[in-house]
Amino acid sequence: TATQPRQPELKTPLPGPKTQAIMERDAQHLSTSYMRPYPFVPDHGEGVWLTDVDGNTMLDFFAGIAVSTTGHAHPHVVKAVQEQVTKFSHVCLTDYPQEITTSLAERLVKHVEKPGEKWRVFFGNSGAEAVEAAIKLARNHTGRTHVISTLGSFHGRTYGAITLTGSKTKYKRGFGPLLPNVTHVPYPNPFRPPLGSTPETCGQAVIDHIESLFVGVIPADEVAAIIIEPMQGEGGYIVPPADFLPKLRALCDKYGIVLIFDEVQAGMGRSGKMFSFQHFDVQPDIITLAKGIASGLPISAMLAKESVMTWPVGSHGSTFGGNPVAAAAAHATLDLLEGEVGHPGCGKSLMDNAASVGAYIMDELRKMQAEFPFLGDVRGAGLFIGLEFVKPDGSPDGKLRDRASLAMFERGLLNLDCGEAVIRISPPLILTREEAETGLKIMREALASL
Ligand code: PMP
């Protein structure tokens, strides 16, 4: 007889007593800036499952914001971390080389280098640090100061990164003055085309808009970089039209501008390819990576073409950046992403698995749109999927999204919002088709309850 697929196990009522007690202490002692969308306090995880301190087991459809690519406590990652931590856990990459990070850099650039092109890597600890490194390098390399970013973007919380961030005003309110010389332009969102364009023309419209700024607003020869998420994450899991990024590349070439792709959220196999820009015929000058790179250990990377990485010795560094234990976790993560090490039920590689299971989830969600007219849009690539809630007039319905998110949680599905009215589906990339079915069933029940 076939074994039943694993299901969430919930002890009602939620939250349980231990969860409540920790949440109360958390509210007493931790930063007032933290958000708590629903009561969940993790105790341990296994694969795509997380168990809270009261013994409730939930299916994880957000993976710690697209971080836990190999799921929780993957044995291959655990072993790599254990082995490295018994050797040494810190010396300092800024001052001394260490083989584990050298080989990690060699592995990462293999995924981006084209014939005749060489890339180099700077390691940090977080996405924001990778973004800071990218804008510092672009300014240093070009001798120009201006940076163009997009509305709806998220690039991190440090001063440079929040300045570039173009989504919620709460990230900036009361923190200014920010970095000077940053301009935001619309993101080509085919579901809500900006600048009076259509889904088909929104890419060209944004290109024309940027070029119009070069006439009278920002001199093009003062623009160091354009930074963009090739698929926009926090802004609502948005995929631009196919012509947009190649046209942006051409624009940057025309004016000598460095093109930075922020792959912190959509990169590292999540979209079904190693980097989300690889769905398009385009090559950037700089790439920022973090989140999914090391299955939850903190490490980030800024990859740059050798021709762009011209900053002098000692001009940039980091005490913890490129930490060897995190690097070991990154190697183990890459083993699974590339398929050098297999994961049961996930075919050749986790990247391929993300592509096929993600396509299945999107198909099923699109079928659900017929049943639930408030599901305005289903979009994404691989296991980078956005589900946008709309009012009958088509405008975003953030309140309904919040109710849907809570209804899913109450049925044992961990999920996270993004954008104005979107639920992001960003599970671990080890999600099997069966586990996806379980998640979809919970989503349907939750949506039917609204
Ligand atoms: N860039 C993007 C695209 C992100 O999604 C995020 C985090 N949500 C960041 C940068 C910042 O990363 P971190 O929180 O690790 O600093």
Image: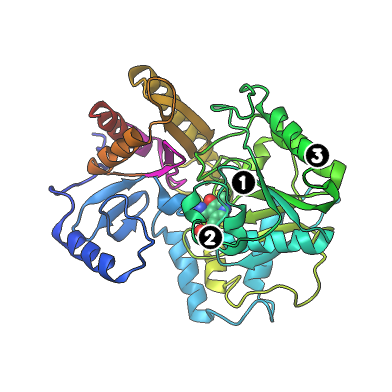
Choose the circle earlier in sequence order: 2 or 1: 2
Disc 2: which residue = 157
- Between 184 and 441, which is closer to the camera in this rendering? 184
Asked if the magenta segment contains residue 426, the reply would be yes
Q: Residue at x 67, y 74 (%)?
A: 317
Horizontal side, residue 410 vs residue 385: left or right: left
Dot 1 crowding, Cα within 10 Å, few <14, some 14–19, many 20+: many
Q: In the image, which is nearer the foreground, mark 2 or mark 1?
A: 2
Gap between marks 2 and 1, in whole Å?
25 Å
Dot 2 crowding, Cα within 10 Å, few <14, some 14–19, many 20+: some
Choose the circle earlier in sequence order: 3 or 1: 3
Applied colour scheme: rainbow
- The quarter holding residue 22 reads bottom left
Asked if the magenta segment contains residue 15, the reply would be no
Quarter of the image where the C terminus is located: top left
The residue range painted magenta reads 416-440
Q: What type is the residue that disc 3 sits on?
A: Leu
Q: In the image, is residue 392 above or below residue 432?
A: above
Q: In the image, which is nearer the foreground, mark 3 or mark 1?
A: 3
Q: In the image, is residue 418 above or below residue 376?
A: below
Residue 341 drawn at (x, y percent): 53, 53
- The quarter holding residue 335 reads bottom right
Gap between marks 3 and 2, in whole Å?
28 Å
Residue 17 drawn at (x, y percent): 14, 60
Residue 274 drawn at (x, y percent): 61, 46
Q: What type is the residue that disc 1 sits on?
A: Met
Disc 1: which residue = 274
Choose the circle earlier in sequence order: 3 or 2: 2
